[in-house]
Image (cartoon, helix red, strand yellow):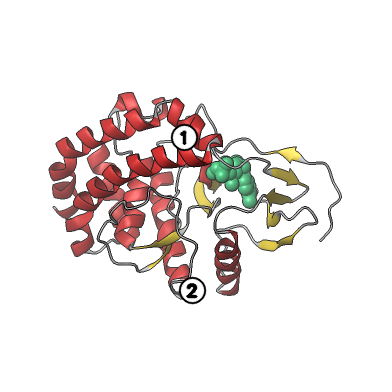
Amino acid sequence: MADEGEEIPLTGGDVTEGLVRVGDTVRRPPGERAEMVRDVLLHLESVGFEGAPRFLGVDSAGRQVLSYVEGEVAGRPHPDWIADEDRLISLARLVRAYDDAIESFGIPMNLPAPIEPPGLPAVADPVELVGHQDITPENVVFRDGRAYALIDFDLARPVSRAREMVNLMLWWAPLGADADVDPGFHGLDRLRRCRLIADAYDLSDPDRRRLMELAIALNERVWHTMKYRAETLGGGWQRMWSEGVGDKIKNRQTWLDQHADSITTALLS
Ligand SMILES: Nc1ncnc2c1ncn2[C@@H]1O[C@H](COP(=O)(O)OP(=O)(O)O)[C@@H](O)[C@H]1O
Ligand SMILES: [Mg+2]
């Protein structure tokens, strides 16, 4: 693996330290489940899925070498197109294409346990595929006004399609009050955007019915997980916690309790 070239730090994300661009590659210090991420990216390549970086190898510093995906990524403050409905629809279609492409990868066995508080009860939910599970604005590359690729597979894990939808709606409807989301997402019709997402993904009716119950259960759980990660891992996790992510999660709980029924109605009507 060639190592030459200037290293340009990539600072748009929240967590990964030491992420750099070198020429048309990205170098990532290995995350918690680096081997699974490698296998996921290789599988996506083998089935001809274009919407993800290619895994190119490991460099002499032990970093994963991925292709750099040219395009637009929303940094902060968010660009004015962040809430565009056509982009939202294209993103839900991209996530559907990803979920369909990764389904044949199967569910890997013997994964390292996720870093979570010991004894935290799991949310009852069927495992269907290795979901992306971190579909934030910073983790999507757009081209020509359409979602083109998902990047940053560090949180990929076995989940249900419904859980993948909760993650997409969380960041892009988004799920939460204006006061708790970035200004580019203020004043939006969340019910309509949840419906647009579900329709573009072609989410099944049974999944639409159970989506909000799942969203509430997952949100309760994530407060504990984020707190534990801040305490045990430090770094970007600690930074997010001291910036108040825990309060945002609690506020989202209130918002979800208030809006769950109307979102479910919007999804089914
Ligand atoms: N393969 C890639 N192609 C294009 N841009 C990338 C790629 N990987 C990372 N980036 C850019 O770097 C930023 C941070 O990378 P990311 O992998 O999301 O790290 P973090 O784990 O910190 O969120 C992204 O938001 C994106 O702008
Ligand atoms: Mg990221």
Residue 202 percent coordinates (x, y)? 30, 61
**Which numbered disc, 1 or 2, marks the residue that appears first in the sequence?**
1
Q: Is residue 94 above or below residue 258?
A: below
| Residue 228 appears in the figure | yes
Callout 1: 10 Å neighbours few (<14), some, many (20+)?
Answer: few
Element at label 2 = loop
Task: Classify mark 2 as within 8 Å of ligand 1 or not, answering yes or no.
Answer: no
Amino acid type, mark 1: Trp
Q: Nearer the viewer, residue 52 or 16?
A: 16
Q: Which residue is mark 1?
A: 81
Query: Residue placed at 63% from the left, 54% from the top?
Result: 30
Say which mark, if any, is on residue 105.
2
Query: Residue placed at 47% from the left, 32% from the top?
Result: 240
Query: Residue placed at 47% from the left, 69% from the top?
Result: 101
Task: Classify mark 1 as within 8 Å of ligand 1 or not, answering yes or no.
Answer: no
Residue 238 percent coordinates (x, y)? 49, 33
Q: Which quadrant contains ligand 1? A: top right
Q: Nearer the viewer, residue 151 or 159?
A: 159
Real-space Cα separation, disc 1 to disc 2, in angstroms: 34 Å
Q: Nearer the viewer, mark 1 or mark 2?
A: 2
The quarter of the rendered structure image containing the N terminus is bottom right
Q: Is residue 109 above or below residue 165?
A: below
Which quadrant of the view contains residue 131? bottom left
Q: Nearer the viewer, residue 186 or 103?
A: 103
Amino acid type, mark 2: Phe
Residue occupying the far front of the picture: 118
Query: Residue placed at 70% from the left, 50% from the top?
Result: 27
